[in-house]
Amino acid sequence: METRHFINLTKEECADYAADLLAGTFRQLELESAKGQVRVLISKKGVPGIKMKRIPQKITALPVVTDHNRQKNYILKEGTPIPFLVDLGVMSENGTIIKSRYDKFRQINRFLEFIEDILPRLHKDRENVIIDFGCGKSYLTFAMYYYLHVQKGYSIRIIGLDLKQTVIDNCNRLSESYGYEKLRFYHGDIASYEGVNQVDMVVTLHACDTATDFALAKAVSWGGICHIIRTVLSA
């Protein structure tokens, strides 16, 4: 019956063990590893002959990890030209985001995620009135109109207020060029605005000092359900 004997040896111990075997009664030794094969033959004169055969190593390509390259599922999609993003310098005419403006693109989409969260509170059966206090260049105001009316089909009227007349004039020009009939901009401040009697949502992103207090007071005075979004998004 064949008997097999297994022992675990280090590389140095294995060399000594093999030498001891060949110095005794064994005249032939074969070693095999993942790197190749070695055959040792001892001649009649006691001279060892060594033959080596290397096994070609297969180079296994490492799997390409692409999880971190997955594009975020933005509300506004890259690759689809959106007029207001083109005019505001965020997107090229073929829908590619301008590299230096990618932070603005992400900011706009992050803002729309806030709007998405309150969709269940808006009305599908009537016009929703939304006021944006301190709208500035109105990147987010245009985005809100596009998302709610163009993409989601809500009936809305958005009023943008700002103290800079030149900004207001430019925003109205852009709004008219896009055919956004229910998006209008006016020169005015939060405290004195009396243009509406009922409001469904109040947005004030950059209100500072007492402006936030005025926005809250106005929202309460208009009654109904008002949502005040005040974030730390940079302009």
Image (tube, rainbow, N blue to C red):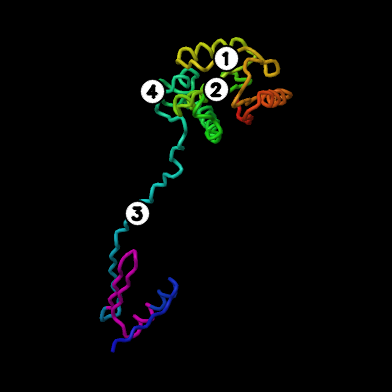
Check disc 4 and report the residue beneath it.
Answer: 94
Label drawn at residue 69: none
Residue 31 figure quarter: bottom left
- Separation of residues labelled 3 and 2 (CA atoms): 53 Å
- Mark 3 or mark 1, earlier in chain: 3
Amino acid identity at mark 4: Asn
Check disc 2 and report the residue beneath it.
Answer: 141
- Separation of residues labelled 2 and 4 (CA atoms): 22 Å
Q: SS at mark 3?
A: loop
Q: Residue at x 44, y 27 (%)?
A: 151
Residue 86 figure quarter: top left
Q: SS at mark 2?
A: helix
Q: SS at mark 1?
A: strand
Label 3 crowd bin: few (<14), some (14–19), many (20+), radius 10 Å = few
Residue 66 figure quarter: top left
Check disc 1 and report the residue beneath it.
Answer: 185
**Magenta-tinted stretch:** 18-42
